[in-house]
Amino acid sequence: MTKRLLCIPLILSTMALAADDAKSGVSITEKDDRLRIELNGEHFTDYLIKGEDRYFPLFYPVLGPGQVAMTRKFPLEIIEGEDTDHPHHQSLWFAHSEVNGHSFWAVREYGDVKPGKTVHRKFKEVVSGKEKGHFISENDYVAADGTLVMSDTRTVRFTTPADAMAPRLIDITIAFHATNGDVTFGDQKDAGMAIRVASDLQVERRTKEKNKLAPAAGHLINSEGVKDVETWGKRARWVDAYGEVGGEPVGVAILDHPENPRHPTYWHSRTYGLITANIFGKRHFEKLDDPKAGEMVIPDGETVTFRWRFAFHRDDPAKADVEGLFKQFAAE
């Protein structure tokens, strides 16, 4: 009897270790309308692909170290006290407001513009793993009139963080394919790899007076040391939005890979919370007269590829060593 009793703690310990081991790594679960991504057993993000009002695939929610919500909830959830401007700013996504004359940025009609949709077609791969996980998806850009404008292939990778407070990474590679004739990305400021950060990270917040902003507690800084409102329209290797969310010191760095076309990118970084890596909006950012200054054309049958990394981190950019994170990304 004594020997049997002595075995019980060992069995329980082994079971606990097995349970912890089962939770470790990157877990990606495919559901009807999304992928659910967990890191070491903790919810990190969902990749939403379907829904009545889904105009493009997107990541929501996005939870940083300590399970801190890193993106604005509106319009995916309605939370009292959040700014409710720009309903097309939906957490973390890619979009462009002029592709062959069609908008894939808006989510409702404005003027004579009817938005198209970036339609998820299928997942080619969904792979979980101890150290890394990834998925590969294929998408079509369908204009409001039903025209198939182009397609893309997205490879999204996740890395198992060293511990609960280590940076959480999303690596996004998008290969844009001119599958239906030449593709022209217009020179527009509303375009690019985008994030709408949590309200607590905004440099400015909306007031009750229309179109007025007031100082808030968040900060912006880019790789060249330019801060806050001055980061808008500047070229830089990365931009970081940081501050405190619910009293927790956190930030998100968006890194532009040096092999990207026209690196380093311009940044459409607004103090009210929108940040996009946008290499297409040259005339806006440099205040040029040429409406095609930043235009990019992909000839029929060809492909152009971009890579970005989102690093959700603790503390400010210096303590988080965002420059070191960029160097690591650049070397990969």
Image (cartoon, rainbow, N blue to C red):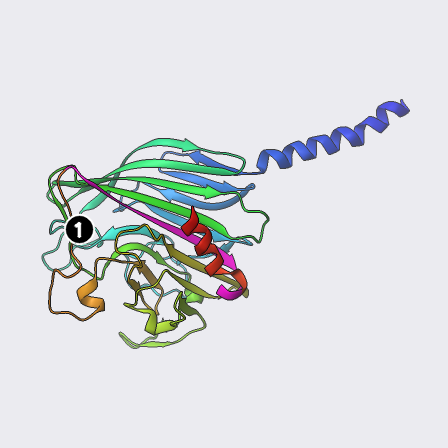
Which sits in the foreground, 151 or 182? 182
Query: Is residue 86 within the magenta segment?
Result: no
Relative image position of residue 79 (x, y in whole percent): 41, 60
Mark yes or no: residue 61 visible.
no
Mark yes or no: residue 83 visible.
yes
The answer to whether 46 appears left or right of 177 in the picture is: right
Relative image position of residue 41 (x, y in whole percent): 56, 41
**SS class, disc 1:** loop
Query: Is residue 308 within the magenta segment?
Result: yes
Relative image position of residue 277 (x, y in whole percent): 31, 58
The three-letter code of the residue at mark 1 reads Pro
Label 1: how many Cα within 10 Å (few below 14, some 14–19, many 20+): many
Measuring 23% from the left and 67% from the top, which residue is drawn there? 285
Q: Compared to 98, does 245 lie above or below?
A: below
Residue 158: name its quadrant. top left
Which sits in the foreground, 172 or 74? 172
Which residue is farthest right? 2
Q: Main secondary structure of the magenta part?
A: strand
Residue 266: name its quadrant. bottom left
The answer to whether 183 appears left or right of 80 in the picture is: left
The answer to whether 279 appears left or right of 245 in the picture is: left
Range drawn in magenta: 301-318
Relative image position of residue 273 (x, y in whole percent): 36, 65
The residue tagged 1 is: 115
Measuring 15% from the left and 61% from the top, which residue is drawn there? 293
Q: Compared to 11, does 318 lie above or below?
A: below
The answer to whether 39 appears left or right of 144 in the picture is: right
Which sits in the foreground, 90 or 207? 90
Measuring 59% from the left and 48% from the top, which residue is drawn there? 163
